[in-house]
Image (cartoon, rainbow, N blue to C red):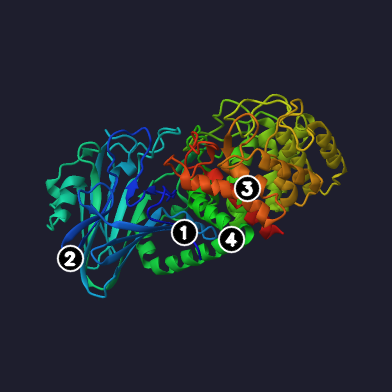
Amino acid sequence: MNPYTRRAPATPLMTHDPYFSVWCFRDKLTETWPQHWTGFIRGLGGMARIDGKLWKWIGPAKSDAMEQTACEIYPTRTIYTFLAGGVELKVTFLSPLLPDDLDLLSRPVTYVLFDVRSLDAKPHRVQLYMDVGVEAATDSFDQPVLWMRHRLAGLDAMRAGTVSQRILERRGDNLRCDWGYLWLAFPADGRQATATGPDQPLRQAFAAGKPFPASDSLAQPCAIDDGFPKLAGTLDLGRVTSATAWLMIGYEDVFCVEYWHRRLRPYWQRNGKTMGDLLETAAAERLGIIKRCEKFDRELLRDAEVAGGAEYRDLCALAYRQAVAAHKLAADADGAPLFFSKENSSNGCMATVDVTYPSAPLFLLLNPKLLEAMLTPVLEYARSAHWKHPFAPHDIGTFPLANGQTYGGQMPVEECGNMLLLVAALDDPAYARRYWDLLTKWAQYLERHGFDPEKQLCTDDFVEKLEHNANLSVKSILALAAYAKMAGKPLTRVRALAKKWMQKADDGDHYRLTFDRPGTWSLKYNLVWDRLLKLNVFPAAVARRELAFYPRVQTRYGLPLDSRSGLAKLDWIVWAAALAESKAEFRAFLEPVMKWIAETPSRVPLADLYETNSGRHYVFNARSVVGGVFIRLLMEKWK
């Protein structure tokens, strides 16, 4: 198994865990928090005392930094390696996002695993410290917080959250969950000491080799910017040549979404389990979960490398956790899973259809039931009296309130095409029959408006509206073909539309951005469904002509979206490249993307929109759409 790896010194790497993000710089770990928060953020701290000397491995502690020698990124794990004082310390952040186990997938728990090894075969006295900032449970630094201690079976646990507990009271994009509780749990095996309170007394106590101050001596409630309160603990490993230790970080959000004015519990909590129960279960199952994650990582990366080469394997490793973590798995009133996306750093929309569309390959590949759980809320909304349009909705609300579409515009052809293609991709006739009235209505809309779209937005709504959009027309044609295939009807009429498209979009050695603009071009990424669904509507020569043209417009960091600017979409590059008939051709489109990931000056989670000349990311952060990079692997599996 080969993870995405960089040896120090290295350029910034991107990684994402569901409940916090960590960044790897050249020789240190540091944390990132929302961009609008100003000042010095001290959200995560880690230190080690080796033979009496203090070292830091993460955060702002005033001590010498351990040398970071490696960062390995797997689908469910990120492993950092540090050296100091004759000791190697490996720190693993493991989020068990296993798609075939919805109970496990929905658990809001991340394991932090420590492996210590002597480099000179001599025993060394090793003590470890870690803290987590309570700001993870707040929206702003002025919110008062409380912290408390819990004694669970075999665990020494702490939790903290806001005093106000404004559960599901607000919606929006640039907002954080300020209800529920952040948890930190250590095994109660006698090696641990834990404390809660402002960070300086806690960190200074460990640095001085002294016990933590008594919790009751630290005043609460306390605003974040009045002491930066932490949940903290130490692990005394003794004099060792090798040793392991672990802890767990969790987040209990009580209620996770509002769905038609009903508050829903997280899926893991559907049978009444408490956070204490969950932490005890997670601790008891730790070793088995680690093995399952290692097996999942190994097999997924192996398959990705076979499908697209080493660069593609690396990209899949970087994208996996982010794509899954930008969703919330909730339980409906009957316990059925509902999987809600959040349109991060765009407008905060919830269950956005044209965000589900690019992310779908990951879920079609690993568990189609998750895609079904994404589509069902949209279909149920479209069937209700609240939706009065003949086309599919854009969203069902703004996170976390799923009470009806909030996006101001409409994307009629885009969303109708997306829904028809995705329902067809599920390949579940019973599910399609359940919503056949809607699918038929949307197919009829595309028959009237889809081939030559009027001026309207498509999923690439960060650029101007277009009329006569050739790529959007491709989506409409293939969606009609998918509908006809589900209905058991011949595709003769749809193939005639494809032939007409080839004539109207023809620009010599490629096809146009719009039917009426000669000399333009765009990525025809929607063509990928012709192969995935085995529709065979467009002749293979159409994709070959496009792929032969793209190298002429490819820049240093990849393929721009179209001829209007140098902006690129990571997901659409991989979709277009997936049409390549050879792995060598596919890799040729991917190499500039991996160069961008290594060289980008933008220190954000894996971006999906960026400038192909400068390499700077553009607006979007931490979005689920990066699940689209799994389309090449999906295509290989579906062969």
Asked if residue 465 is positioned above or below residue 327 in the image, the reply reads above
Q: Report x, y in % for residue 371.
A: 60, 49
The residue singled out by tag 4 in the image is 305
Say which of marks 3 and 2 sits in front: 3
Secondary element type, mark 3: helix
Looking at the image, which is closer to me, 328 or 291? Answer: 291
Disc on the earlier residue, 3 or 2: 2
Residue type (three-letter) at the residue carrying disc 2: Asp
Is label 4 in contact with label 3 (beta carbons under 8 Å)? no
Disc on the earlier residue, 3 or 1: 1
Looking at the image, which is closer to me, 490 or 1? Answer: 1
Is label 4 in contact with label 1 (beta carbons under 8 Å)? no
Disc on the earlier residue, 2 or 1: 2
Residue type (three-letter) at the residue carrying disc 3: Phe
Is label 4 in contact with label 2 (beta carbons under 8 Å)? no
Say which of marks 3 and 1 sits in front: 3
The residue singled out by tag 3 in the image is 589
Q: CA distance from mark 3 to mark 2?
A: 50 Å
Residue type (three-letter) at the residue carrying disc 4: Glu
The residue singled out by tag 1 in the image is 104
Disc on the earlier residue, 4 or 3: 4
Disc on the earlier residue, 4 or 2: 2
The residue singled out by tag 2 in the image is 51
Q: CA distance from mark 3 to mark 1?
A: 36 Å
Left or right of 520 in this view: 292: left
Asked if residue 610 is positioned above or below residue 85 in the image, the reply reads above
Secondary element type, mark 4: helix
Q: CA distance from mark 2 to mark 1?
A: 39 Å
Secondary element type, mark 1: helix
Q: Report x, y in % for residue 182.
A: 32, 48
Residue type (three-letter) at the residue carrying disc 1: Leu
Q: CA distance from mark 4 to mark 3?
A: 15 Å
